[in-house]
Amino acid sequence: MSKRPSMAAKRMSRQESDLVSLRTEREANKFPLSKAPFLRADTLTAAEQESIELEEGELLCKAPDEVPWIDLLLEISMTTAFASLTDGTPVLQWANVVSYICFFTFVWWIWVAQVAYNMRFRQADWLHRLWVLCQLIVFSALCAFTSDFDITFGLTGSDPTEALREQLMVELGNDNGRLAAQTFRNERLPRVNARGISMVLALSRLLLLAQYVVVFFHAKGLKRNSILLHIGTLMFSSLCYFGAFFVLGSSGQDDFATAIPALEVAKLVLWFLPIVVEMLSHFVALRLPGFVRYSTESVSARNATIFIIILGGGLDKITSGFSAFVGNIGLKVNAIPLFLATAAIFICLFSLYFSTPGSTRELSNRRALIWFMSQGLFLGPLLITLQAIAQSLQFSNLLNAVQLGASALTPMFDHMRDFPDVNVTVEMFPATQILFDKIGNSLPVVISDANRALAYQKKYNESINTYELQETMIIVYDGILTTLDALPDVGSLLWAKANTFLTVSMTNATYLTEANYNDIWSGVIFDRGSSELWLFPAAGASILALVVMSLIKGTPRDKFEWAIVGARSAFGTAICLLVLLDIGGGASPITASSTLSGSKIWTLVLGPTQWPLIILAFVLVALRATEHIIALAANRTYMSFENIPMFQPPARSRTHRYQRNAPNDRDSLALNDYRYSYTDRKTAEPAYNDPFDPYAEAELEDSKISRQTSQSDTVDGDGDDRTLHGDEVPLIPKANAPDGY
């Protein structure tokens, strides 16, 4: 009997294990200043050289396990830049969408180019850790120039409403000097941001250029044409971005506030031309001697990581507005369908990405690179879709809050019309008092203004309609929009119109009209609800981008993958076609007579229920259900006609003594005579031989099975001690029967 180890021996064993693990950790933390990424032929054994298959001109590199954990910092810093852009420039208008996509292109390409380098040449050394720190600085610097970023600055011409805005601002008490200073600042910031972005992009190219230069020196004695191409294109990109920086400051003025259209066009060329050149250079480099392969596993891991991080950032943007739902008027129980629709959209987008056909296919070198870069076609619309969902939820809450706030004043207005000689008091409207407390407004102040309006009506025969419009605007603008942080930009035309409406005398029948009220309210709808106009095209483009990515990975391998690709194409196109609902959406949502415009999108949005999110969720859920049905059809098993249970005769009854054991009952055995294969070929070979087929009479006659009634009659003394009926078959199949049966 073995002796148990003593406690001292156990402690010694643990100490030895700890020392071994400590030594392993210390060895892993030994980083040289710079480590060559290449595996040379003279360092490999003969067996390793035979097992490695290289294309002509290909170099072999090996990345350490430590790399993915540090590279995660790159994805996080990239997402931080997007979050900074969203906070500095909310995606509320079409111009914001265009600017957001352009900024996304810059950040995405910085990430793609760096990850393309890391997947091939990144090593565990101190120099590469320094590169990571520099990349964090680059993305942090980009965050500094995201406020009021406008890609269309200097290209759209003068604003025809500028004169009206200045007139209203003067009426609100702003002198011309202050207006000139505000205009100067508004025109200067986009120019300064553009110059700052140009400089950051140039520094990012220089940083990547330095990394390729180090790799070039490590490749001494090897073919380096491919690396030289990367170095050349990065030098070209750096010159272009430095050129954009100086071009934007070449107007001859120190303030950089004067926009020159020709310079703005040159800026766009110098910004996007290097990206196109660098992108093409990656494909050309794969055809030159000295290239390094892109592995499918690395590309899949990077794509999945950045998708999850961006999806998480979008979820954070969506949930950040939920705090406005608590303690305020707005969405309550009627928010449940919208929340369920949002959750369904989010889950469907997540599952659609990870259930893309061909996700596990091994890709060729060039195809893997194309697939890696094509993800930008998906991430861009995905970001816009997530931003539109967040804005749609907040806008739905705003609409419900405005509806409740306006309806709370209705009892008071009705009382003023029915009893014009009776002053109103706070005690008359307890429900209104509760609602005003929730939004932080004072009902006594409103009551005081109401009694003053009644006095004007009695003394001067003035209508209270002007007071009703102004008081409703006060509740909507000063109460609800302020509480929900949905006020228009200070100094904008909408801001000037609303403040003028609020400050004029309550008897000013010239300005306090229903048409002006509806014009301001329509402006608020445009300002906060325009995301409904691009929700469907952005979501549809995301689905179609997944189709493109799937086809890039390879042609569908069977009819079921073709069916999934076809379903995604059909549903994605259908979602995009929902943009037809936007026809007429650019006109005022509410007419001067307080009726909805003819646009279907505003009919869906401004009704009791906000339908766009629900419609999108329904379509995406239908797409996922269709894909599940296709998947079930692809995995189904085929059975021959005679083995389908419904066509079998009734099972013969037996006494309990002679009942077969459950594990051996023929009725519990699955009959899979035909099985599906991905080659679309069916095999007639049965999955197993049925030992209990009572219809093989000829086979039973040849089996020479004698009926045994006692255990002693068997060959091995292990026979069947039961008596068989005339219509029964022995449990022992012919193939397994002992000799003598």
Image (cartoon, rainbow, N blue to C red):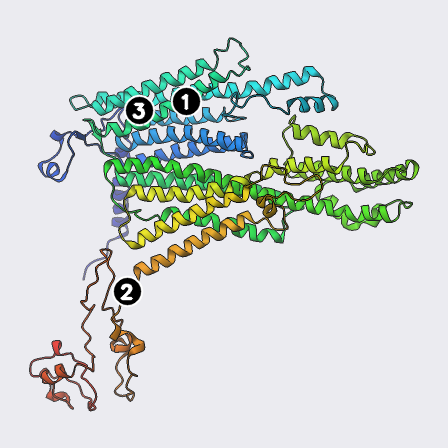
* SS for dot 1: helix
* SS for dot 2: loop
Q: Quadrant of the N terminus?
A: bottom left
Looking at the image, which residue is at 36% across and 26% down?
A: 275
* SS for dot 3: helix
Lower position in the chain sequence, tag 1 or tag 3: 3
In the picture of the structure, the residue carrying the numbered disc 3 is 127
Q: Quadrant of the C terminus?
A: bottom left
Looking at the image, which residue is at 24% across and 26% down?
A: 35
- Identify the disc placed on residue 637: 2
User: Could one spot residue 317 in this view of the protein?
Assistant: no
**Residue type pointed to by label 3:** Leu
In the picture of the structure, the residue carrying the numbered disc 1 is 271
Side of 668 relative to 546 (left or right):
left
Query: Residue 122, image x and y in percent?
Result: 28, 30
**Residue type pointed to by label 1:** Trp
Tag 1 and tag 2, C-beta contact below 8 Å = no
- Circle 3: is it few (<14), some (14-19), or many (20+) Cα within 10 Å? some
Tag 2 and tag 3, C-beta contact below 8 Å = no
Lower position in the chain sequence, tag 1 or tag 2: 1
Tag 1 and tag 3, C-beta contact below 8 Å = no
Q: Which of 106 and 437 is in front in this view?
A: 106
Side of 723 relative to 157 (left or right):
left
Side of 209 relative to 396 (left or right):
left
